Amino acid sequence: MQPNHLEAINVKLPLEESGGLYTVTVREGCWTAIEHQEGMIASSEHLPIHELSFAELKATPLLDLEGKVMLPGFVDAHMHLDKSYSLPWVRNRSGTLLEAIENYRAASPAFTKEMIRDRIVKAARNSASFGSAVLRSHLDVPVHMGRDMAMRTIEAALEAREMVSGIVDIQYFPMYFYDPAYERELGEFAAETLQMGIDGVGGAPHLSPQPETNIAWAFKLAQRFDKPIDLHTDESDNPDAKTIDIYCDYVQAGGYGGRATAGHLCSLSAMEHREAERLIGKMADSGVAAVTLPVVNLYLQGRGDRGNVRRGVTRVRELAEAGVIVAAASDNIQDPFHPFGRGDLLQVGLMTAYAAHLAKEEDMVTVLRMLTTNPASVTGVRRYGIAPGNPASFVVLDAASEEELFQELPSSRWVYNKSKWTFASLLNRYGVEADQTISQI
Ligand SMILES: [Zn+2]
């Protein structure tokens, strides 16, 4: 049983505007005080966190962070947990989005529910060990290939969520692939899944034979079940891919501002600047949030280019400057859509800093917000952040500044969530101590 009271001194909180060091206090899993310090405090009662084993950490109520950075638990707003770690079964020779989709679809009938469930658990657990507290995952549900196969993924996802519920929260947004030939089957399937505990409506209208009908259908479904909507949007190098234009119209007409998210938005980068500005302004006016997935789009996009290869990453800076909420997220992990990644949002933050040219000293906090407060807003997480009254969900990282976080990508991390320490230091990479929920697997 971990003590229900926790106090840490000499804590660096990069998201607090006044800077400096803080003393922070948790009681019964909630923040009770965040107090600014006048310089470093010396205390023999508080134990240095890096000297403690995981067992000692869990029994220690008074900690000295010695100036280490603490952030609220990361929120990874766009993942594909069901596909993660499928690379050994599904390769991608061309490195294109289309081959990834085709090969994954071809391999899908052979995946059992248990295989999918275990992949989700592995990815969720690894993400949590790096400091993520909330994950939003899209799910592959190709109803046109067979209802049973699609439902298998839903059932695997719900089981996996239950198994990791002691360490991380997961939201699911199935990618309902609209094809008029299968409209009735898709509608019945979607309604059933939303009644089973699925959190929102996903999709990829730019890949549908009828993009606008797809968007209209998705909104009708979301409104019927009062769910948020999160669409893969214009993941293409083609500057004429503009489903975002239609998406914004439906958000405005349906009063969906603040509950609608657009992922990828690659074509925004490929198109002429004035047109991109118009669409970005429309997103800001409609209240559509943006999620950039730089690691995956750097891998998948620009495959037809030679020489000056397009990078496929959306206009992160322009979106943020226009007032659009921008989050950066993992997308795929070790699958045909992206052979690398490990569920570490700090790594994604570093790639965002490179890809979006956000590397000035003051940009570091902007990038950190794209991994924390912004995705919390995108995913509708309430009472988020290190502030009195909020649930204590945080990660301590072995770095003395926000810049050092991206310079060193510290592997030593201490993660607290759901009223307890869940992972600590190098233990996370070597699995010395597993959470009870996980050890039952
Ligand atoms: Zn995606």
Image (cartoon, rainbow, N blue to C red):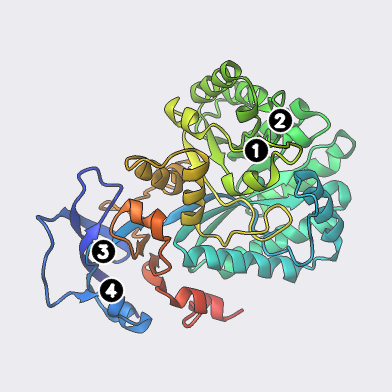
| Residue drawn 81% across the image and 48% down it | 99
Along the line of sight, the residue nearer the viewer: 233 or 217:
233
Query: What crowding class fits label 3: few (fewer than 14 Cα within 10 Å), some (14-19), or many (20 or more)?
Result: many
Which residue position holds label 2?
Answer: 215
| Residue drawn 68% across the image and 33% down it | 234
For the residues labelled 2 and 1, say whether their Cβ atoms are less than 8 Å apart. yes
Q: Which mark is residue 26?
A: 3
Amino acid found under the numbered disc labelled 4: Ile
Residue 261 percent location from the top left of the image: 57, 36
Q: Which mark is residue 155?
A: none
Query: What crowding class fits label 2: few (fewer than 14 Cα within 10 Å), some (14-19), or many (20 or more)?
Result: many
Which residue position holds label 4?
Answer: 49
Give the mark nearest the N terminus, 4 or 1: 4
Residue 113 percent location from the top left of the image: 76, 67
Which of labels 2 and 1 is toward the front?
A: 1
Query: What crowding class fits label 4: few (fewer than 14 Cα within 10 Å), some (14-19), or many (20 or more)?
Result: many
| Residue drawn 32% across the image and 64% down it | 29
Q: Is residue 246 above or below residue 209?
A: above
Give the mark nearest the N terminus, 2 or 1: 2
For the residues labelled 4 and 1, say whether their Cβ atoms are less than 8 Å apart. no
Which residue position holds label 1?
Answer: 231
Amino acid found under the numbered disc labelled 3: Val
